[in-house]
Amino acid sequence: MEAGRRGPAARLATLAGCVLIVGASACGGSDDASTVVDPGAVRTANPERTFAPLVEVAANELWRPMSARWFIERSVFWFAEDDGCADRKIAVGHTLPGQRDSVTDWIFPKGLGGWSWPAYYRNPYDATCEDNFDLRFHADQLTRPHDPGLRVDGIRPGEGFYLDLVDAARGGPAVDGGLDESVYAERVNEGDGGVRLTYWMLFGMHGVPGRPGTHEGDWERVHVLLQDVGDDRYQPDVVQAEGARLRDSAWATTRRVEGMHPVVRLAPGTHSVTVSRLGESCGDCVPWETWRSLAAVRKEPWYGFGGAWGGVGDTDATTGPLGPYRVFR
């Protein structure tokens, strides 16, 4: 067992009191989305929480959201080999005691990210499936199999670390009256006062099994672009939906709740993100109030894991995705 194992991810501090808006008030009940207008600069000491989205999830969604800890604890950690060599099991999640043995320990999340603890490493096999001690790959390097990014030197296309979620966990935790799974917030200062807030969401599957592009694991994200005008004041500008390409929605025409929370919708199965416009609604969607379950992603022990969140397929499209990583992509 891991000594001193961290407890649940530290939640971002809740902003006390009402959000102060220059020339207006956002205190009180929820907004009538059809009458929301551009409010001007917002004063807040916690913009990550203030501008966190309301995510609408289809009532019939098969692949519900989950926290990264929930995913890791129900996964087996592997190093994928190439050229016909068998993959090697490294560690197992704490909910899988039957798979632990004398050479397979528990998964230590700190060993995935490598920023607060030495990262897991493996020497890859050579063509005869023996250890190649001239090479060593670490879990905090970009090793995701088939990834189109700049992977570590010397790694073959199908090689790399991956977390294989057990099939029974792909649907996520049961929903009992609402969604409260962790959402991971990240702030990037882009220069000249520009601020990008990114909200990362994790799911056990993407797509429909048997159809093209389906894969285990699914990280989705929403961006809110702000202008920092000083004195803890921020001018919201754009909401971006992440997908095959970024899709911008102007702040003034984006549907919001409780003043500052933009509303986005997830497509069933794929979780493709769409920004909701003024006057739209989602009927029987399940609301996910992400500001109630935020965690600071860069403080997570697994942050920076460069492998796949999900099993390995034959291509980039059928392999689990890369999650929050030190290089923004």
Image (cartoon, rainbow, N blue to C red):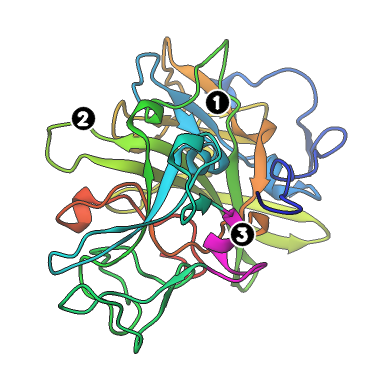
Q: State the separation of the CA atoms marked 1 and 2.
A: 22 Å
Residues at circles 1 and 3 in contact by the CB criterion of under 8 Å = no
Look at 73% across and 54% down and name the residue there: 3
Q: Secondary structure at mark 1?
A: strand
Q: Amino acid at mark 3?
A: Lys
Q: On the image, which quarter does residue 16 sit in?
A: top right
Whether residue 292 is visible to the viewer of this picture, yes or no, is: yes
Residue occupying the far right of the picture: 17
Within 10 Å of disc 3 (Cα), the crowding (few <14, some 14-19, many 20+) is many
**Disc nearer the start of the sequence (2/3):** 3
Q: Is residue 283 above or below residue 116?
A: above
Question: Does residue 105 show up magenta in the picture?
Answer: no
Within 10 Å of disc 1 (Cα), the crowding (few <14, some 14-19, many 20+) is many
Q: Dot 1 corresponds to which residue?
A: 288
- Highlighted magenta segment, given as a residue range: 108-119
Residue occupying the far front of the picture: 102
Look at 35% across and 14% down and name the residue there: 60
Look at 57% across and 62% down and name the residue there: 111
Task: Classify residue 38 as left or right of residue 148.
Answer: right
Q: Dot 2 corresponds to which residue?
A: 208
Within 10 Å of disc 2 (Cα), the crowding (few <14, some 14-19, many 20+) is some
Q: Which mark is residue 110?
A: 3
